[in-house]
Amino acid sequence: MKSEPKPKILFSRKEIAAAVKRLAAEINRDYRGKNPLLIGILKGSFIFMADLVRLLVFPLEVDFIRLSSYGSGRESSGKIKVVPGLSTPVKGRDVLVIEDIVDTGLTVAFLLDYLRKKRPSSLNLCALMDKPSRRRVPLTIDYLGFTVPNKFLVGYGLDWDEKFRNLPDICAIEE
C-alpha cells in the first residue's frame, strides 16, 4: 500500500504574508489613480488573490479565468484550454493577471497572448512564485513573491489532485 506523501514547509504563513504585503505595496505604487482589472487564474490563485486584493488601496475590478493543463497528474500536459471565458471586457483596461506559480510558463504565456488579442491598455503579471528551472517559454513577471526550487508545491491554494490546497503554508511534497 502506497503511503500518503508528506508536505514539508517551504514558506511559512508569516513569510507568505510578508511577500503579499510587499507585492501589494509595489502594485499600490504603480496602479495609484487607475481602475485596473485583476484577473485571477483559477483555481490555484484564489487564496493569494484574496489576500492581495484586501491590501490594495485603489478602485479595482476582479474577474477569474480557468485554464487547464494538468489533469490529475504532477506534470503539465502542455495543452492548455480556457474553461470559462472572462465576463469583464478587457479592451482599453489596465489588466493585472494574478497567478499562484509560474512553472513552464506555457499556461501564463497562453493567457497573456489570449488577453493581448483583446487589446488592453496595459497588461502585467503578478505571481506569488516562479520556478525558473522548469521554464519552457520566455516570460516576464512584473511582480514576484518568491523564486522556488524545482519541487512539487502544495498549500496556500496550490493542490495535488485537489488535495492540500487548504494548507496555510507553502509546502514541498516529500515522497
Image: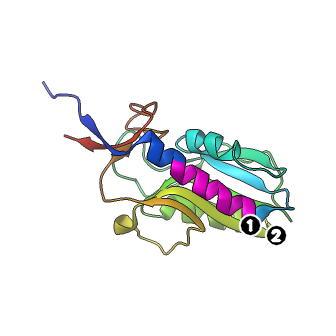
Q: Tell whether position 102 is magenta.
A: no
Frontmost of labels 2 and 1 is: 1
Viewer-closest of 120 and 150: 150
Secondary structure, magenta segment, majority class: helix
The percent position of residue 13, horizontal first and vertical second, equals 45, 40
The spot of residue 82 in percent (x, y) is 61, 49
Q: Which residue is mark 1?
A: 30
Residue 161 relative to residue 91: left or right: left
Residue underneath mark 2: 121
Seen at 34% across and 67% down, the residue is 133
| Highlighted magenta segment, given as a residue range | 18-30
Residue ID at (85%, 61%): 34
Between the C-alphas of marks 2 and 1, the distance is 14 Å
Q: Residues within 10 Å of mark 2 (few under 14, many from 20)?
A: few
Q: Earlier in the sequence, mark 2 or mark 1?
A: 1
Quadrant of the frame with the N terminus: top left
The answer to whether residue 81 shows anywhere in this view is: no
Q: Is residue 20 magenta?
A: yes
